Amino acid sequence: MTTPSRDHWPPALRVFPHPASLRWRDETSAMPPGAAEWAGSDPLRMGLAPAWLRERTTGAWCGASPCDAQAFRLRIRPDATAESEAASPAGLRHARAALVQVLRTCGQRLPCVEIEDRPAIARRGVMLDVSRCRIPTMEEFGRLLRTLAALRCNHLQLYTEHTFAYEGHEAVWDGWSPITAEELLELDSLASSLGIELAANQNCFGHLRQWLEQPGYAHLAETHGEWMFDVWPRSGPFSLCPTDPRSLALIQNLLGQLLPCVRSDLVNIGCDETYDIAYGRSKAEVASKGRGVVFAEFVSKIAAIASGLGKRSMFWADIALSHPECLSLLPPDAVPLAWGYEPDAPWDRWCGALEGREFWLCPGTSSWRSMTGRRAERRANLAGAVRATVDRGAVGLMICDWGDSGHWQTWPVAMHAIADGLAAAWTSVLPGDADHAHGSALLWGDNGACAAWIDSLGDIDAALRAECMGLSRPGVAGAIRNQTALFADLFQSWEAKTEVGTRAAWEAAEAALDQLGSPPMSSTLVARELAHTLGATRWMLGRFALRRGWDLRSDLKTAARSRAEVRRRHAELWTERSRTGGLAQSLAFFDRVAPAPGEPAGGTS
């Protein structure tokens, strides 16, 4: 989809994502009576339209695509009325989303515009990690769902390992402030009223350490011994043993409690990164059948449980794509989710391997294992995924925001990236600077300064990222992956790997941070979150240089020793949006950072 020029846009108008067609002939209209109040009254829940708004559903024509069914036309007339028409109720909701932005940004005189728009991708999803420490409060979930609806998201998953309050499994979730069945039912109802499909999500194979370390579940683990996670040695439990029937009994119990809480017919059963399989109790079975076959047989049994509960399974496709023999053994209606979070993710190759099945592509926000996010990597990753989704027949696109290593990224950094991805999924084009100004008005209520600041922040250590792979994979040159260089450097011992990262690249980061300046003012909470993000970035930048013995300005020397202050601000801000459960685990990652020379005593207090 191409996007129209802004050469003749009304000056105050802010619409995000950028519509496919917008026409204006310099006419304006008075604000309809009560329109401002209506715009703040939850209009995307599609209550009765006010008298000045006429809405008409035309019905989709024979053979209409799912994207055409969500198309809409919106007109604001000189007589202080508006009208919209769409093939479906979903299209009318998208028209309302655009209308609300016009009402909120244009003041008492509205431009008489005609907007026509349709999505490039029919199913535009977001996945939020609610297992890596941070679980939003119900109030925050409500704000989140309304924001996602305004961004025209229509699918949401909450990634769960151990943070749903399963009855009879209190030992696993105790202390985590889990999402209860009643809360999930409430969230499902709100999501549905906003046009968002909330799909159940429970990892059912790997990533179950929190379960398997408990005495009552240890017998279900594949191994409690040593194994390799890609190139990194690991020990202890991670995955269920796929050859133990008791593993399936546990999954039957969990899904039996979880799935009735949501109305979507989809459930994400996870099953990613099961690298420990064959290192423990399934070793003989893998030797006989092959790792891919053992994986596929167990996933098929999980999918059968979900099917018996009236749901169709989605699963992370990394293992199946690395073992092609898997795909023909998996249920034909199970939906692979091909995920990749770097610019070089081979989307086209994965699409080719999955051809003939319904599948989704899943890029990422690049916000995790950082404070700043990684703008360049995120943008290139999204661009490749969106293009492949449109060109290669993927059914949907789901943007993933993970919380690895303490979920330190603040919500504005993550939300900016989510908005970037959802806008690209709607238009098929990555938002430009002018689009981000419009998105900033929607998210933060400002003139674009917040979005521009967050975007610049996301490239602060770009030069270091390009050369710091050695911080993650010793002896390997190139760009670091899945984290920022400043974040990765925190978790080295004081003397380790100090040869990784040049002074010139660090000085580029220092200059970029100085040029960025203080965060712009937005809402009080967003301003505080961005100030914390800036302070934490200064801490990381100073510590990176101090660890290498480089001369530093006095302010950066002080910043390098400010772990306790950064930790305190992190804890203070946590409960503004998140439940208390998980905070102790998040703070523990600060305690893994080796103290800097001269750091005040009590650096973790």
Image (tube, rainbow, N blue to C red):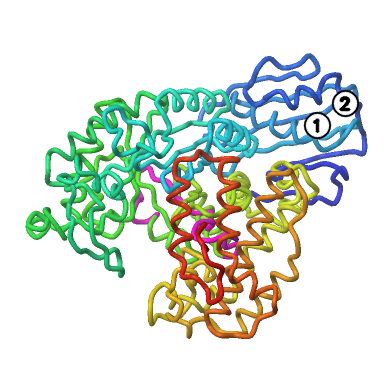
Above-or-below relation of 487 to 588: below
Using the image as rendered, state which of residue 264 and residue 468 is in the foreground. 468
The crowd level at tag 1 (other Cα within 10 Å; few <14, some 14-19, many 20+) is: many
Across the whole image, how many numbered discs are drawn on residues? 2
Give the percent coordinates (x, y) of residue 429. 63, 53
Q: Residue at x 80, y 31 (%)?
A: 103
Using the image as rendered, state which of residue 169 and residue 75 is in the foreground. 169
State which region is magenta.
351-376
Task: Please say whether residue 359 is one of the residues in the magenta stretch.
Answer: yes
Using the image as rendered, state which of residue 391 and residue 94 is in the foreground. 94
Give the percent coordinates (x, y) of residue 60. 57, 26
Residue type at mark 2 is Met
Q: Earlier in the sequence, mark 2 or mark 1?
A: 2
Query: Which secondary structure, mark 1?
Result: helix
In screen coordinates, is 15 left or right of 348? right
Q: CA distance from mark 2 to mark 1?
A: 8 Å
Above-or-below relation of 476 to 198: below
Residues tagged 2 and 1 counted as in contact (Cβ below 8 A): yes
Using the image as rendered, state which of residue 566 and residue 577 is in the foreground. 566
Q: Which residue is identified by label 2?
A: 31
Q: Which residue extends farthest front?
A: 601
Task: Determine the main secondary structure of the stretch shown in magenta.
Answer: loop
Query: Which secondary structure, mark 2?
Result: loop
Give the percent coordinates (x, y) of residue 547. 52, 79
The crowd level at tag 2 (other Cα within 10 Å; few <14, some 14-19, many 20+) is: some
Above-or-below relation of 373 to 59: below
Residue type at mark 1 is Leu
Task: Please say whether residue 153 is one of the residues in the magenta stretch.
Answer: no
Q: Residue at x 38, y 78 (%)?
A: 474
Q: Which residue is identified by label 1?
A: 103
